[in-house]
Image (cartoon, rainbow, N blue to C red):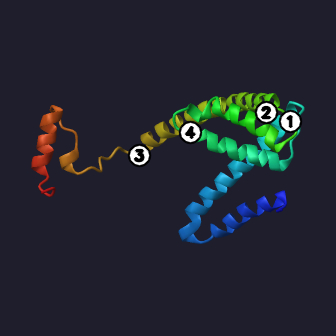
Amino acid sequence: DLPGEFSLVAPSVLAVAGIVPRARTIALALLVRQAEFALLTFRYWVVFRLIGAPIDLEAAIVLASVNAIATLIPFISSGLGVREWITGLITPLVSPDTFSQGIIAELVHRVAEITVIAPLGMLSLALLAARVRRESKLTPRQDHAPSRWRRRRCLPSRCFRARLQDDQSWR
């Protein structure tokens, strides 16, 4: 068995790999993903303590892993409903807690997630919009597209024919 502290080595190794210029982007992406997963594990550990059913680090890691996979289900938005059921089903297998405690913990986690993410998302969107407006005022607009692709005042079918006639390289 590897101790739980061994998981702290992975971000360090990724940070060292970031020194190599060719691997820097992937190393930084993996480092961010590791930090996100560590935070998710910590959140599960805290949520179970909040509802009075503490779990150990290994159980929190298992629940975070399973729920990260459940979030990837494409036809349901962010695993809505699926995460709750999976947490309820997995909780008795990895801890002495019951199915209902797992469901309650996941619902508390979901509410906490929404109350934090929604305001931060709105704030980030406002800051991003302000930055885009500020930068668009500072730099003059330039059309970097070739002249044959610039907007023309014509019907779409005529524009398409005109573009084909202008560009003979496609043949």
Q: Amino acid at mark 4?
A: Ile
Q: Residue at x 60, y 56 (%)?
A: 29
Q: Residue at x 83, y 39 (%)?
A: 46
Q: Secondary structure at mark 3?
A: loop
Q: Which residue is mark 3?
A: 139
Label 2 crowd bin: few (<14), some (14–19), many (20+), radius 10 Å: many
Evaluate if marks 2 and 3 touch, with contact meaning CB atoms under 8 Å apart.
no
Residue 140: image location, x then y, percent? 37, 45
Q: How many marks?
A: 4
Of labels 3 and 1, the one closer to you: 1
What residue is disc 4 on? 73
Q: Is residue 162 left or right of residue 150?
A: left
For the residues marked 2 and 1, what is the alpha-carbon distance in whole angstroms? 7 Å
What is the three-letter code of the residue carrying label 3? Answer: Thr
Residue pointed to by mark 2: 102
Quadrant of res 97: top right
Q: Amino acid at mark 2?
A: Gly
- Is 55 on the left or on the right of 169, as rendered? right
Q: Position of residue 93 (x, y in %)?
A: 80, 42
Label 4 vs label 3: CA separation?
41 Å
User: In the rendered image, which residue does mark 1 sit on?
Assistant: 97
- The numbered mark, 3 or 1, whose residue comes first in the sequence reads 1
What is the CA distance from the residue labelled 1 to the residue labelled 4?
A: 26 Å
Badge number at residue 128: none
Residue 50 against residue 69 in the figure, above or below: above
Counting other residues with Cα less than 10 Å from the Cα at mark 3, is it few (<14), some (14-19), or many (20 or more)?
A: few
Mark 3 vs 1: CB contact within 8 A? no
Camera-side mark, 1 or 4 = 1
Local secondary structure at mark 2: helix
Q: Quick check: marks 2 and 1 in contact, CB under 8 Å?
A: yes
- Dot 1 falls on a residue whose secondary structure is loop
